[in-house]
Each structure stands twice: as C-alpha cells, then as structure tokens.
Image: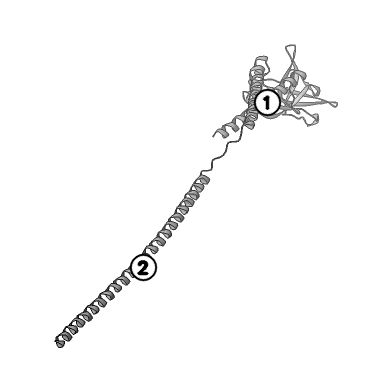
Amino acid sequence: MKKALSIIANVLAWIVLIFALLVTIMVFSSSKNNGVANLFGFMPMAVESDSMKPTFKQGDLIICKEVDDYSSIKENDVITFWTTIQGQRVKNTHRIVEVIDEGGVVKYVTKGDNNPANDDDVISQGAIIGRWTEVKLPFIGKVMDFLRTKTGFFVCIVIPMAIFFLFELYKFIATIIEAKRPEPVEVDEEEIKRRAIEEYLAAQKQAGGAADKAEAAADKVTDKIETAADEAKKLENAAEALVNTAEENISEVKETAAEAVEAAAEAADKAE
C-alpha cells in the first residue's frame, strides 16, 4: 500500500511539473510573439467572446496551427488573424465565408458563427496567425488567462514547482540516509525452525546413545553378577559334596571301630 501511494505521488508530481513547464513555455513564448504562444507550430488561444458560439464560446481554449501553405486555406475554414477593433490591433477567430482572388492577391471575408453580418475588414494572408485544428477545451481558456497573470503564474506555477523540487530533494536525502544504514538481518523463521529441529534430534540421538551405553554397562554388570552367582553355587555344591563324603567316611569309620570292639570283646571272652 505504501509503495502504491509513493508511485501515485510521483506520477502526480511529474504531471504538475510537466504542466508547469508547458505553461511557462507558453507564457514566455507569447510574451515574445505579440501575445501568441507557439509550441512546435501549435498555438493555444483563449476565446474572448461568444461570436463563434455554438462552435466554441468565451472561456474555451482552442488549438490553432501555423499555416505553411496559404493555398490550402479555403472557404469554411476557421482562422485566427490580426484585425483592428475600435482602433486597437487584436486577435480574432472567425470562419471564412468567401475567398477573393484579385489578380493573384488572395483575401478572405470572415464572419462569426454567432454574428448576423460579415466582418467589416477583409483579411489578407499576412494577417493570418493560424488555422483552427477543431480542438477545443471548454473553460480552459479562463484558466490560461489566469495563469498569464502574475498572481496566477506565481500560485499555479512557481509554488507547485518549488514544492516538486523540495519533494525530490527530500527523496534524495532520504535515499542517501537509507543507503548509509546497515542492512537489517533478515530473520528466516523456517530456517530457525529447521535448526531447532536438527538440534533437538541431535540431543535426542546423544541421549539415546548414552542410554544405550548405560544399558550395555548394566547388562555387563548383570552378566558378571550371574557368573559370580553360578560360581558360588558351584562352590556350595562342591562343599556340600565334601561334607556328604566326610559324613559317609565317618559313618564307615564308626562302623569299623564298633566291629573291632566287638571282635576284641569276643576274643577276650574266648581267652577266659
């Protein structure tokens, strides 16, 4: 969202700048060309009366073009020309209603679409400023007239251009500051999770290994205990066997001794 707003602001700023430059060129061009602005052969002109209504009316902006070939001008064309009204040389834009050729000298009779009669003066080719291109912008003529004033030029051109350059300066400084900042380390959550899992598995593996070793050691101890128990059992059995053997031998000795005593007694008796 922030990026989209930045793009829109940049586009609007450049539109304002381009418009301001065009108006500036028009103002300076018109000041050097008897009040007629000329942009690459095209002349924007503010309509100052309703004499051509409804074709265009006061306050509209029309676009005329320089005439390169006067022979191309014909009846029904709308032209802008210099004329004298009430003793003053002014621009006028009317329609040609008749073309007069007097021995190679061509002149034009003009008339406003909203006027009841033709214009008093016949127009020579040298008085023609340009021919209407049939392009008109409603109400823009009033805006252009205002922009040609000192107040309009200052408010609508100087101030916006100053704001534009301040905005671009701010962006430039912000870019430099941003470039000097250390780049933040990007935290990859997936990488962190993966490492945590690997460390957990490694710990589990180590714990499992230790458990296996402990279990193996316990098994060895158990085996040794069982072996010792078996040896003790064997010794016990051997001792028991020895005891039994000794008891049997004692019994035999007793019996032999008893027999010997009896035999001795009998021999004594016989001797008597």
Q: Residues within 10 Å of mark 2 (few under 14, many from 20)?
A: few
User: At numbered mark 2, what does the secondary structure look like: helix, strand or loop?
Assistant: helix
Three-letter amino acid code at the position of disc 2 = Glu
**Residue that carries the numbered disc 1 in the rendered image:** 62
Where does the image place residue 245, in percent across and percent down from the top left? Answer: 28, 76
Quadrant placement of the C terminus: bottom left
Observer able to see residue 114: no
**Observer-nearest residue: 110 or 34?**
34
**Observer-nearest residue: 216 or 72?**
216
Which circle's residue, 2 or 1, is located before the other in the chain?
A: 1
Whether 268 is drawn above or below 143: the answer is below
Where does the image place residue 8, in percent across and percent down from the top left? Answer: 59, 32
Assess whether mark 1 and mark 2 are in contact (beta carbons under 8 angstroms): no
Q: Residue at x 65, y 15 (%)?
A: 151
User: At numbered mark 1, what does the secondary structure look like: helix, strand or loop?
Assistant: strand
**Residue that carries the numbered disc 2 in the rendered image:** 231
Q: Residue at x 50, y 50 (%)?
A: 198
**Observer-nearest residue: 205 or 179?**
205
The span from disc 2 to disc 1 (Cα, nearest Å) is 125 Å
Where does the image place residue 154, in percent across and percent down from the top left? Answer: 66, 17
Residue sitting at the far bottom? 270
